Amino acid sequence: RWSLQGTTAIVTGGTRGIGHAIVQELASFGANVYTCSRNQMELDECLQQWKTKGFKVEGSVCDLLSRSQREKFMDTVSSYFDGKINILVSSMLQ
């Protein structure tokens, strides 16, 4: 089994469908993952599930269709990962 220990990943739309599965898979291999969702309740539920499994996942609410929210999200993620991002997965749906 291979390892993603020490790597960082952003997964947009990580609370549903394929995005959710990708967050889980990356985190299960040891990646430190940051995700976003438009829905705070869904995000909170997913973050709780992932933390219960011991995964290193954080997230914030963001509507990626909004330029100002995208910019704030990227500032937050950049600060969280000290500017180091290894993996980017865009899984948002309109």
Image: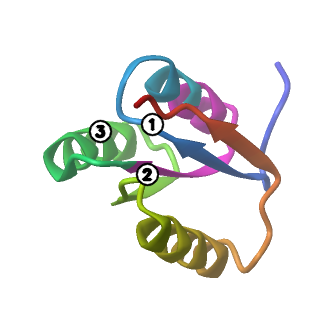
Residue range corresponding to the magenta coloring: 23-36
Q: Position of residue 89 (x, y in %)?
A: 67, 37
Q: CA distance from mark 2 to mark 3?
A: 22 Å
Name the image quarter holding residue 83.
Answer: bottom right
Residue under the point 79% across and 40% down: 4
Q: Confirm or deny contact between disc 2 and disc 1 (CB under 8 A).
A: no
Comes first in the chain, label 2 or label 3: 3
Residue type of the residue flagged with mark 2: Leu
Q: Quadrant of the C terminus?
A: top left
The residues bearing labels 3 and 1 have C-alpha atoms spaced at a distance of: 9 Å
25 inside magenta stretch: yes
Q: Position of residue 46 (x, y in %)?
A: 29, 38
- What amino acid type is highlighted by mark number 1? Gly
Q: Could you tell whether 7 is left or right of 31 in the image? A: right
Judging from the image, the colouring scheme is rainbow
The number of discs equals 3
| x, y percent for residue 86 | 82, 53
Q: Is residue 46 left or right of residue 17?
A: left
Task: Give the residue at x 45% y 74%.
Answer: 68
The label on residue 46 is 3
SS for dot 3: helix
Mark 2 secondary-structure assignment = loop
Compared across the picture, whether 64 is left or right of 5 comes to: left
- 25 lies above or below 38: above
Residue 84 in the figure: left or right of residue 19:
right
The label shown at residue 65 is 2
What residue does disc 1 label?
Answer: 14
